[in-house]
Amino acid sequence: MYVNGRLKTIKDKMPLNELLLQEGHDIERVAVEKNGKIVPRSSFGTEMLSDDDRIEIVCFVGGG
Amino acid sequence: MTNIDPHQVKERFRDGKVAVAGLGGLGSNIAVMLARSGVGKLLLTDFDRVEESNLNRQYYDRSHLGMLKTDALKTQINKINPSVDVETCAAKVTEENVREIFKNYSIVCEAFDDPKYKAILVNALLDGQRKIIAASGMAGFGSANKIKTKHTFKDMYICGDSEPAAPGGSFMAPRVAVCAGHQANMVLRLLLNIEEE
């Protein structure tokens, strides 16, 4: 699987929120696209990722 | 596309409808740049009032202190380009009202301060029906060249350097305006259907 363009190998399917935790993201500050489609926040716990997925994670920092 | 007829450019901008979410250092500058460019309709949203501490980087002056930012910015825009149709909304954007507030706008500039609200806006509005130009990272005194426009998601561009502010870090007029310029420039490009990097 690719996460923000980096190759990451996973053995088994995993839910998206586990990946976010592994990558050290605050779930309240992120938006995630899986294979070019936005994943609704309500589905972070149920959206399963497999090794051929492409994931883009945006984690916002403050200021405006 | 670079040879686009100037009359057509003017027409496309005049037909443009753009929402600006948050009217701080980014949003107030974005809205003014779009008004100067002749974008026909703007929705300005912010629940806050103008404070003295805003004047180091936001498009207000002392006469606006205490006014709602929506009203103050509408006044500024009317003085610059009275032909812009300005709609305002002074409600705080929440997960519950966000879709309703922005439903008529297919281009939205995310210019909030709080990253949680940035995420709420983006997650609610990226429904395949609109483009979002968001911002992340414009604090401090780093090189202005670090601030970039990135086509991160299919329907979302992010402007900034992605760097969090240092504790007690400052937001200064030049870097904030550079980021606002990136966002406003991307809006104009979208109105001309220019989507490549």
Image (cartoon, coloured by chain):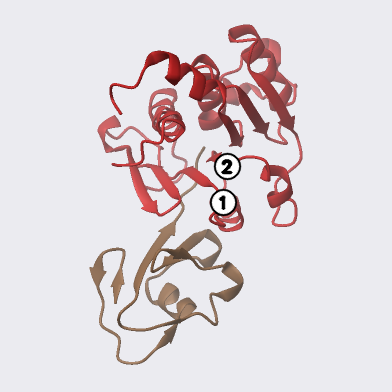
Chain colours: A brown, B red
| Mark 1 or mark 2: whose residue is earlier in sequence | 2
Element marked by disc 2: loop
* Residue drawn at point x = 41 percent, y = 45 percent: B158
* Residue drawn at point x = 64 percent, y = 12 percent: B83
Give the x, y percent position of residue A19. 41, 77
Give the x, y percent position of residue B153. 41, 55
Please name the amino acid that badge 1 sits on.
Gln
Res. B57 visible in picture: no
Mark 2 highlights which residue?
Answer: B106
Between B32 and B87, the one lying in front of the other is B87
* Residue drawn at point x = 55 percent, y = 31 percent: B27
Give the x, y percent position of residue B123. 56, 58
* Residue drawn at point x = 60 percent, y = 35 percent: B19
Above or below B169: residue A20: below
Mark 1 highlights which residue?
Answer: B129
Instruction: Classify residue B47 by image quadrant.
Output: top right
Res. B115 visible in picture: yes
Element marked by disc 1: loop
Q: Kindly report the distance in space between the C-alpha atoms of the residues bearing marks 1 and 2.
A: 7 Å
Badges 1 and 2, same chain: yes
Name the outermost residue toward the bottom.
A12
Q: Left or right: where does residue A34 sit relative to residue B59?
A: left
Instruction: Classify residue B76 by image quadrant.
Output: top right
- What chain letter is assigned to the residue under label 1? B
Q: Left or right: where does residue B186 sit relative to residue B54?
A: left
Point out which mark residue A30 bears. none
Between B73 and A24, the one lying in front of the other is B73
